[in-house]
Image (tube, grey):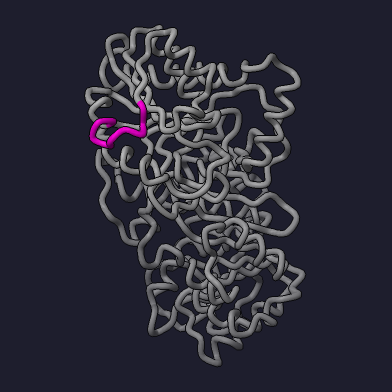
Amino acid sequence: MSDRRGYFTADAVRAAEAELFTRVPAGMPMRRAAYGLATVVAGELRARTGGVAGRAVGLLVGSGDNGGDALWAGSFLRRRGVAVVAVLLNPERAHRDGLAALRAAGGRVVDGRAAVDVVIGRLDGVDLVLDGIVGISGHGPLRPGAAEIVAGIDVPIVAVDLPSGVDPDTGAVDGPAVRAEVTVAFGAYKPVHVLAAPWCGRIVLVPIGLELPEPELVQWEPAAIGAGWPVPGAADDKYSQGVVGVCAGSAKYPGAGVLCAGAAVAATSGLVRYVGDDDEVLARFPEVVVSRNVSEAGRVQAWVFGPGAGTDGAARDRLAEVLATDLPVLVDADGLTMLAEEPGLVRGRTAATVLTPHAGEFARLMGSAPGDDRVAAVRRLADDWQLTVLLKGRATIIAAPGVATAVNEAGGSWAATAGAGDVLSGILGALLAAGRPPEWAAAAAARVHALAANLAAYDEQPAAAPISASPLLGHIRAAVRVVREMSQP
């Protein structure tokens, strides 16, 4: 699995933990986790304050094992000269051995049921706070008392395994929750770490010896994407590298054709055929071969249909003609609007088919919004329609029947701009034309698209600035170069 990072549900992790407990002495996994947590916290103290000894850390301790992890970590930090104060949100149910270890090391304990201003006052002067309120068994928002305490904290928070108040399996946040600067994951990455990355901050994995199953949710590593990206070989020509046909743009939306076709040009070294009436495409990209009709386009190995293409009768007939081929087809934007009205156009296709909706388009296709569990929703559409679905977002979800669901965490929201989806469609279509499997092509396109957006936003400057789709398009080659460099030995 070195080419992909796996994310494991709470049930899968609990099963792996139960198996681990049969192989190691009682309490050892918690102490392993806590020691790793304390090491990360010490590193944060050093980076933020210049040292460890003489610093101060607060613990928010719930009643579960995450509270125990925080207490044990506090005892290790106390032995390194860190002042530690633990706020017990439910004192009667605090982890007994962890609490005893903290007290033996000289840590202080505060009853978290006291007035909020009193509790916050006891945390005055700490450099960091550890969130050990709830773990992978917790669901729903923080309870009112804990929420008030968290709201009053003005120093960085390190989350123990996951930020409290964020769902471990879906990443959903439906009320008060912890927003961490760092999250220390124990034993395995959980879906929350990729689906709710803005709440987790930087994520550090501490191994504790879990034997894990094959993951059902994965993220492709950039080096693996770079290694699989199509580049010309000694015997290649423009046809062997993949010819993509692009049906996008119109007199009303000329920019969509420019962005989609331009992205296909930038993504690979094959050939792009543009079908449509948008003269701006040829003016911007003279290497594109233009035709007015699908039947006149010539040799094509994959089709992209939809961005700015319109939804009138002529557009519907063109979509039907493309879908009637035995070639891979990507459908986006206006094409999705038509499929929502006439799903029979795509159902039953045996050739690879990829749909790339945003949340609103997804709701039209399925009849309901993705909801809190975006992964399950995308899997349902992919299984029901028997095709590949890419649901756009900061955490983009890619599902296809019979394979692990993929996710791409963009690392930012710079691609949340008009026309960015048109660029993504062009990249993905070029990869399909190059013969890449649809689920891999979708994940790879999403990663390079996100990287291009980040490169454009920073543009080699120390601070980022908002971008439009045009600079995103202009950074595709740089993004491909980055992932390919990462794949080099």
Q: Position of residue 251 (x, y in %)?
A: 39, 84
Q: Nearer the viewer, residue 311 or 402?
A: 402
Count of marks overlaid on the render: 0
Work out whether 90 lies above or below 51: below
Work out whether 450 lies above or below 246: above
Looking at the rendering, the stretch of residues picked out in magenta corresponds to 111-119
Q: Nearer the viewer, residue 73 or 312?
A: 73
- Magenta stretch: includes residue 118: yes
Q: Position of residue 121 (x, y in %)?
A: 23, 28
Q: Is residue 49 left or right of residue 369?
A: left
Residue at screen point 59% across, 66% down: 244
Q: Using the rendered view, name the quadrant where residue 364 is placed.
A: bottom right
Q: Position of residue 176 (x, y in %)?
A: 38, 48
Q: Nearer the viewer, residue 466 or 33?
A: 33
For residue 159, say whether it is visible.
no
Work out whether 115 lies above or below 210: below
Q: Is residue 384 left or right of residue 153?
A: right
Residue at screen point 66% across, 35% down: 14
For residue 396, say whether it is visible.
yes
Work out whether 113 lies above or below 271: above
Q: Nearer the viewer, residue 273 or 114?
A: 114
Q: Is residue 69 left or right of residue 156?
A: right
Residue at screen point 54% across, 65% down: 370
Q: Quadrant of the N terminus?
A: top right
Q: Position of residue 376 (x, y in %)?
A: 62, 58
Residue at screen point 75% across, 55% down: 402
- Magenta stretch: includes residue 434: no
